[in-house]
Image: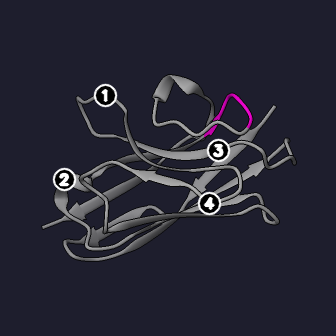
């Protein structure tokens, strides 16, 4: 069983920055990729970024590439999402999630088994 708790969301002006954190507990082995997803009102949950179990591989959706950076600290069981140059269209509830299979890194929502409760990010123009 894995528990994921996100933090760091909030209200920011266009062009601002936020850093999201996701603390994992309950499973101490670090062989699972971790991802960030987001869901805006009335829309499906979508992939944002993922990082492999060892941090060597990252993937981003096109709309955030170059503005967002995902990282992880396995010693602290924490994953981060640094978000810069935020835009109003980035407004959503952001969720972190853990892959269901060890050593696999994918961008598919259905491959992530454990989810946090989400943190709201609002970008005002």
Residue pictured at 30% horizontal, 58% vertical: 64
Give the alpha-carbon distance from disc 3 to disc 1, as whole Å.
22 Å
Can you tell which of label 1 and label 4 is closer to the viewer?
A: 4
Q: Where's residue 95, x and y in %?
A: 50, 44
Q: Earlier in the sequence, mark 2 or mark 3?
A: 3
Q: Secondary structure at mark 1?
A: loop
**Which residue reaches farthest top?**
110
> Where, by quadrant of the figure, is residue 7 drawn?
bottom right
Residue pictured at 41% horizontal, 71% vertical: 18
The residue to which callout 4 is attached is 56
**Which residue reaches farthest bottom?**
16
- By secondary structure, the bulk of the magenta-drawn segment is best described as loop
Residue pictured at 19% horizontal, 53% vertical: 89
The residue to which callout 1 is attached is 44
The residue to which callout 3 is attached is 33
The residue to which callout 2 is attached is 89
Give the alpha-carbon distance from disc 3 to disc 4, as whole Å.
11 Å
Q: Secondary structure at mark 2?
A: helix
């Amino acid at each position: 069983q894995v528990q994921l708790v996100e933090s760091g969301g909030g209200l920011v002006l266009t062009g601002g920055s936020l850093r999201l954190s996701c603390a994992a507990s309950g499973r101490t082995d670090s062989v699972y990729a971790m991802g960030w997803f987001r869901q805006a009102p009335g829309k499906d949950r979508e992939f944002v970024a993922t990082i492999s179990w060892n941090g060597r591989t990252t993937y981003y959706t096109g709309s955030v590439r170059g503005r967002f950076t995902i990282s992880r600290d396995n010693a602290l069981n924490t994953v981060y999402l640094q978000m810069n140059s935020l835009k109003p269209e980035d407004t959503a509830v952001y969720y972190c999630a853990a892959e269901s299979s060890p050593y696999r890194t994918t961008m598919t929502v259905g491959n992530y088994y454990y989810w946090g409760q989400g943190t709201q990010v609002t970008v005002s123009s």
